């Protein structure tokens, strides 16, 4: 079956099949900025937002980036460099 790419979403019907070895090679070559953008979209919920106005959106995205950087700095200062990119991994309790 052939699907006309002009009529469908190009993000879904990509030239390289999802999960193939060549797809994995390309996926691992993504830049860090793409990973940050993905985290902002998905983890912080900006993919489906109800924010109106450029100033409000810039403020919310700036706060999300500040939270990400603060969490990374906190993990690094506490000697947990492996958790610097983690948003959901619990921080061990210290007594």
Image: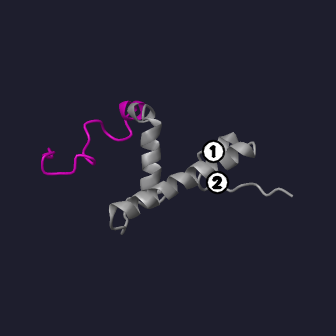
Instruction: Check contact, mark 2 vs mark 1: CB within 8 A.
Output: no
Quick one: 12 or 39, which is closer to the camera?
39
Which residue is rendered at x = 68% and y = 40% of the image?
A: 81
Q: Quadrant of residue 24?
A: top left
The residue singled out by tag 1 in the image is 84
Q: Which mark sits nearer the N-terminus, 2 or 1?
A: 1
Quick one: 79 or 30, which is closer to the camera?
79
Disc 2 to disc 1, C-alpha distance? 10 Å
Q: Which segment is the magenta one?
A: 1-25
Estimate the x, y position of residue 86 in percent, counting from the top left: 60, 49
Q: Nearer the viewer, mark 2 or mark 1?
A: 1
Q: Which mark is residue 66?
A: none
- Main SS of the magenta part reads loop
Estimate the x, y position of residue 4 in percent, counting from the top left: 12, 46
Estimate the x, y position of residue 38 in percent, counting from the top left: 43, 49
Circle 2 Cα neighbour tier, 10 Å, few/some/many (<14 / 14–19 / ≥20): few
Residue 64 in the figure: left or right of residue 70: left
Q: Is residue 63 above or below residue 19?
A: below
Residue 50 in the figure: left or right of residue 4: right
Q: Residue furthest front?
A: 55
The residue singled out by tag 2 in the image is 89
Quick one: 54 or 16, which is closer to the camera?
54
Which residue is rendered at x = 51% and y = 52% of the image?
A: 65
Report helix, strand or loop for mark 2.
loop
Residue 87 in the figure: left or right of residue 55: right
Q: Residue 16: say if magenta.
A: yes
Which residue is rendered at x = 51% and y = 58% of the image?
A: 63
Quadrant containing the N terminus is top left
């Amino acid at each position: 079956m052939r699907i006309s790419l002009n009529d469908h979403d190009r993000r879904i019907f990509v030239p390289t099949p999802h999960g193939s070895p060549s797809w994995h090679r390309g996926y691992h070559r993504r830049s860090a900025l793409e990973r940050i953008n993905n985290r902002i979209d998905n983890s912080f919920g900006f993919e489906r937002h109800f924010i109106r106005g450029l100033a409000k959106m810039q403020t919310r995205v700036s706060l999300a980036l500040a939270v990400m950087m603060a969490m990374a700095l906190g993990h690094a200062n506490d000697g947990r460099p492996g958790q610097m990119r983690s948003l959901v991994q619990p921080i061990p309790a210290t007594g």
